[in-house]
Amino acid sequence: MGHFKESLKKITVHIALVLGILILITVLFLKVYLPSYTNHGQTVTVPDIEGFEFHELESYLQARDLTFEVTLDSGFNAELKPLSVLKQNPKPTSKVKSGRKIYVTLNSKNAPLLKMPNLVNSQLKNAQEILGNIGLIRGEIIYVPDIGINVVLEQKYRGRNIPEGFEIPKGSQIDLVVGDGLGNQILDVPNLIGMDDIDAEFLIIGSGLRMGRINYVETDSVPSGIIIRQMPPSGATVKTGEPIDLWISESNDNRNNF
């Protein structure tokens, strides 16, 4: 009987120890491991960091249980500061686990160089699309008399004509000289007979025409520098931009002085 009691006592102690260990394991699981596991898997919302400067990223993301890594890719946006965020992955509002790494693409310090395309003889609409697609900005549109309506006649960068293949920074502004389509307009030729050559030139250009050939004619009856003939004649109908040939008097006295 005494042996039985001693064995029962030992079994009871062992059971108590086992129960104690199980309770301890349960407490550790509930109080330590489970909260740690739950926090590790907690989801956070990815913030919008596009436009942030590089030095702002670490503290901003750490406060939101996120990290970041800069990708090897880069881009350029003239409106953003150098080394600011151009793109991010994952995108804003995405749901990710805490501690997730956000990959960022930074804005380059210097604009990359692009080769200027040929826009001459293109329609204005097409020229604008080409500029936008390669990263250039359409600047001022300068209309000039020409029969080609909205046809690009010249492409300019900083006031100078630039040829195809010329390298310019991405984001540069390109001004376009474009035909106004008035080259088909019919005009009456003004009367230039009796005018001096300077006034005649002003009137020709102001009328939407242009200077043609200049011929000098010796005469004693008309002072030097006076228009004595024109072609086409006064009253004739011509198109905008047509040349006007002039015959200008030149006295014999002037020739003898040379």
Image (spheres, rainbow, N blue to C red):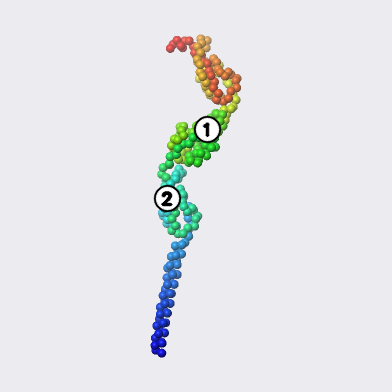
Where in the figure is residue 218, as x and y percent of width and height?
50, 11
Give above or below for 170 relative to 224. below
Q: Residue at x 46, y 36 (%)?
A: 116
Q: Residues within 10 Å of mark 2 (few under 14, many from 20)?
A: few
Give above or below for 227 relative to 131. above
Where in the figure is residue 76, as x and y percent of width and height?
44, 44
Q: In the structure shown, which secondary structural element does the residue marked by tag 1 occupy? A: loop
Give above or below for 150 relative to 21. above
Where in the figure is residue 19, as x and y percent of width and height?
43, 77
Say if mark 1 contacts mark 2, CB within 8 Å.
no
Q: Picture quarter containing residue 146?
A: top right
The front one of 42 and 51 is 42
Q: Picture quarter containing residue 228?
A: top right
Q: Would residue 36 be found to the left or right of residue 193 on screen?
A: left
Q: Give how far apart the Cα atoms at labels 1 and 2 are.
A: 41 Å
Where in the figure is residue 187, as x and y percent of width and height?
59, 24
Q: Residue at x 58, y 21 (%)?
A: 189
- The mark found on residue 71 in the picture is 2
Amino acid type of the residue that numbered disc 1 sits on in the rendered structure? Asn
Q: Is residue 142 visible?
A: no
Amino acid type of the residue that numbered disc 2 sits on in the rendered structure? Thr
Q: In the structure shown, which secondary structural element does the residue marked by tag 2 occupy? A: strand
**Quadrant containing the N terminus in the rendered view:** bottom left
Q: Residue at x 43, y 67 (%)?
A: 33
Residue under numbered circle 1: 121
Q: Would residue 141 be found to the left or right of residue 59 on screen?
A: right
